[in-house]
Image: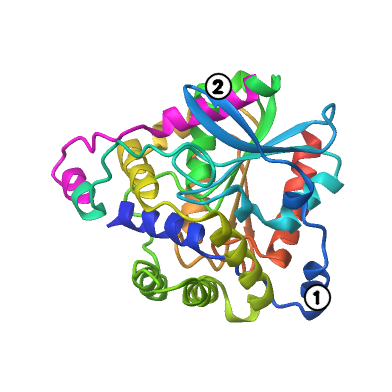
């Protein structure tokens, strides 16, 4: 059940548009903020025999920040506020779609077994036998650094992306300036489960909408379910749902990525091997991966700092992103 809730959290991050704190003044400003995604071209790189879609923003001689997204999610899910905030702070920002997601290469010829079958195999101790692993996805990120000539980067991961970032830090410490794990988990057993409303939102998300318009409305409703009521900005949620819908989702890839998460298992021992400056950020109101997941992650990484963001759920809305930036930017500047 615990691994299923990891899937729910990452899945809902991928379909949600972004629950944002409802600060009227800041929310209004966010709507007119620059859109860095439309201001920078999309490129493709051959990495580990996989075509990876990416965007490279900011001065090439600035300190690089590599952003790693979650299960089935696209680089768009980082949102304008967080990406532009990093650019305004003077960083070079590199984002990409993980394999089998967004505009990166899809593995159409590989099987995508039902989630329940993967869970049964895991429950009885059978190897999930994933099409690829989190280690492979970590190698994709390092391969992209190679293509771009980036020797060392600040690596920031969210949800499943946080898990991938943890693997990068443990396996490739010489390629990191720092690690930031956001709204993620160690995968350890016994951590709190998702809240009922998050599970209900998943049930809704699992049903295919009959048309684009209804799909947009469903995405907005899911976004609302993910965050605290006082932190919801419908205009921002709708905008992000529409952008993501323009690129389209890919269910089989999401399932294969879930297999990779299950196969990764409990990473507690791996986290104890990490020896790079680490910041763990988690939403105090995360209904999918409750804040205890972040606290547990920080406790298992030697010397890690932990920050809980009041009111933040399992998404990057504009005001929540401002609060993340308030902790993230000083950390990156210090390392």
Q: Position of residue 297 (x, y in %)?
A: 49, 45
Residue placed most toward the observer, 42 or 238? 42
| Image height of 324 relative to 147, above or below | below
Q: Is residue 92 left or right of residue 191?
A: right
- Circle 2 residues within 10 Å: few <14, some 14–19, many ≥20: some
Badge 2 marks a residue whose secondary structure is: loop
- Which residues are drawn in magenta? 119-146
| Image height of 58 relative to 12, above or below | above
Q: CB atoms at circles 1 and 2 under 8 Å apart? A: no
Which quarter of the figure is the C terminus placed in?
top right
Q: Is residue 288 left or right of residue 318?
A: left
Q: Is residue 194 left or right of residue 244?
A: left
Q: Which residue is mark 2?
A: 172
Residue 131 lies in the magenta-colored region: yes
Residue 59, visible in the rendered structure: yes
Residue 275, visible in the rendered structure: no
* Marks 1 and 2, how far apart at CA: 41 Å
- The residue lying at 57 percent from left, 59 percent from top is 246
* Labels in figure, total: 2
- The residue lying at 27 percent from left, 57 percent from top is 1
Residue placed most toward the observer, 144 or 21? 144
Q: Position of residue 169 (x, y in %)?
A: 55, 29
Determine which quarter of the picture holds residue 82. bottom right
Determine which quarter of the picture holds residue 106. top left
Q: Which mark is residue 134?
A: none
Q: Nearer the viewer, mark 1 or mark 2?
A: 1
Q: Position of residue 261 (x, y in %)?
A: 37, 42
Q: Which residue is mark 1?
A: 28
Determine which quarter of the picture holds residue 53. top right
């Amino acid at each position: 059940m615990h691994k299923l809730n990891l899937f729910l959290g990452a899945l809902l991050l991928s379909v949600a548009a972004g629950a944002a704190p409802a600060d009227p003044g800041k929310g209004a400003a966010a709507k007119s903020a620059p859109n860095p995604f439309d201001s920078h071209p999309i490129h493709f790189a051959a990495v580990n025999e996989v075509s990876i879609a990416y965007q490279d923003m900011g001065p090439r001689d600035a300190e690089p920040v590599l952003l790693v997204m979650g299960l089935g999610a696209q680089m768009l899910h980082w949102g304008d506020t967080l990406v532009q905030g990093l650019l305004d702070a003077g960083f070079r920002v590199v984002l990409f779609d993980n394999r089998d997601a967004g505009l990166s290469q899809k593995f159409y010829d590989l099987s995508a077994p039902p989630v329940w079958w993967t869970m049964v195999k895991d429950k009885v101790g059978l190897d999930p036998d994933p099409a690829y692993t989190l280690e492979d996805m970590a190698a994709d990120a390092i391969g992209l650094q190679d293509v771009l000539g980036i020797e060392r980067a600040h690596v920031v991961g969210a949800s499943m992306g946080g898990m991938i970032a943890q693997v990068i830090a443990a396996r490739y410490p010489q390629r990191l300036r720092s690690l930031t794990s956001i709204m993620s988990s160690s995968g350890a057993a016994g951590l709190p489960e998702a809240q009922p409303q998050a599970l209900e939102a998943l049930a809704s998300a699992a049903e295919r909408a009959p048309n684009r318009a209804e799909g947009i409305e469903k995405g907005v409703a899911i976004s609302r379910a993910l965050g605290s009521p006082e932190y919801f900005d419908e205009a921002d949620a709708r905008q992000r749902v529409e952008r993501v819908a323009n690129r389209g989702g890919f269910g089989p890839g999401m399932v294969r990525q879930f297999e990779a998460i299950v196969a990764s298992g409990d990473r507690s021992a791996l986290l104890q091997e990490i020896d790079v400056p680490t910041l763990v950020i988690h939403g105090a109101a995360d209904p999918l991966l409750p804040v205890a997941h972040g606290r547990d992650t920080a406790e298992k990484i030697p010397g890690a700092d932990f920050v809980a963001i009041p009111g933040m759920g399992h998404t990057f809305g504009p005001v929540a992103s401002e609060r993340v930036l308030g902790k993230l930017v000083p950390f990156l500047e210090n390392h």
